[in-house]
Amino acid sequence: KNEVEQSPQNLTAQEGEFITINCSYSVGISALHWLQQHPGGGIVSLFMLSSGKKKHGRLIATINIQEKHSSLHITASHPRDSAVYICAVKNTGNQFYFGTGTSLTVIP
Amino acid sequence: GAGVSQSPRYKVAKRGQDVALRCDPISGHVSLFWYQQALGQGPEFLTYFQNEAQLDKSGLPSDRFFAERPEGSVSTLKIQRTQQEDSAVYLCASSPGGLAGVTYEQYFGPGTRLTVT
């Protein structure tokens, strides 16, 4: 069973394109995280959301609690954005459930 | 400031050996999480500590896996009698954490890549 589903699994974009990665979840959550993982394993937390929308530079994250859906948008994509983007949700306890990630490649 | 550190970064073990993986969380962080990430997969929850108390160990895959955080700071994940299916990256994360109903950012360590041959 997958409590968290991401789409697409793989995404290739041209530099400058607007990118959207989607996340749907099936459990009750207290927060949703978007994480970035570069080759070699390092994970960086991009956003933590419990409602609405957050923006940081070229990154925007939105969440719709009623629809159990979140999106991560990247505007003006750049090759350095190439990474795996992971959606993770925290249930009302302290367990985290992770999606399998979206592998993004931005081509110059 | 120092982030979460893990050691060793890479570990090769022969099947049947015991291994110990160390996590040094950010100083003062109350919560500590261990995750297992198989190749090409997202991380999967193993266990959670609040200070020295192991509040959730439901993700530990078998009784060969054991985690401790005796003084509420450094944590060790021990795997006994390693099997090939234990090969994965083991990630540790910490967060300020602690207040019921409040969710905090998690800060991840670089992981320990365990290969069991």
Image (cartoon, coloured by chain):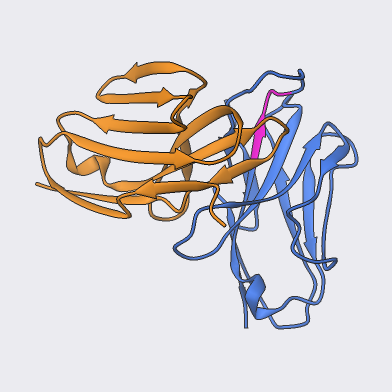
Chain colours: A orange, B blue
Determine whether B32 is above or below A5 in the image. Answer: above
Provide residue A37's location: percent of width, then percent of height. 42, 46
Relative vertical location of residue B89 with respect to residue B105 in this rendering, above or below: below
Determine the residue positioned at 78% across, 82% down: B16
A42 displayed left or right of B46? left
User: In the image, is residue A46 part of the stretch drawn in magenta?
Assistant: no
Residue positioned 83% across, 68% down in the render:
B64
Q: In which quarter of the image is residue B38?
A: bottom right
- In the figure, is residue A86 to the left or right of B87? left
Q: Which residue is drawn at 64% across and 49% down?
A: B6
Q: Where is residue B51 in the image (x, y as percent from the top left)?
A: 83, 31
Q: Position of residue B75 (x, y in %)?
A: 78, 45
Percent from the top left, x then y, of residue A96? 62, 41
Main SS of residues in magenta = strand
Tell me: residue B87, above or below residue A78. below
Q: What stretch is highlighted in magenta?
A: B93-97
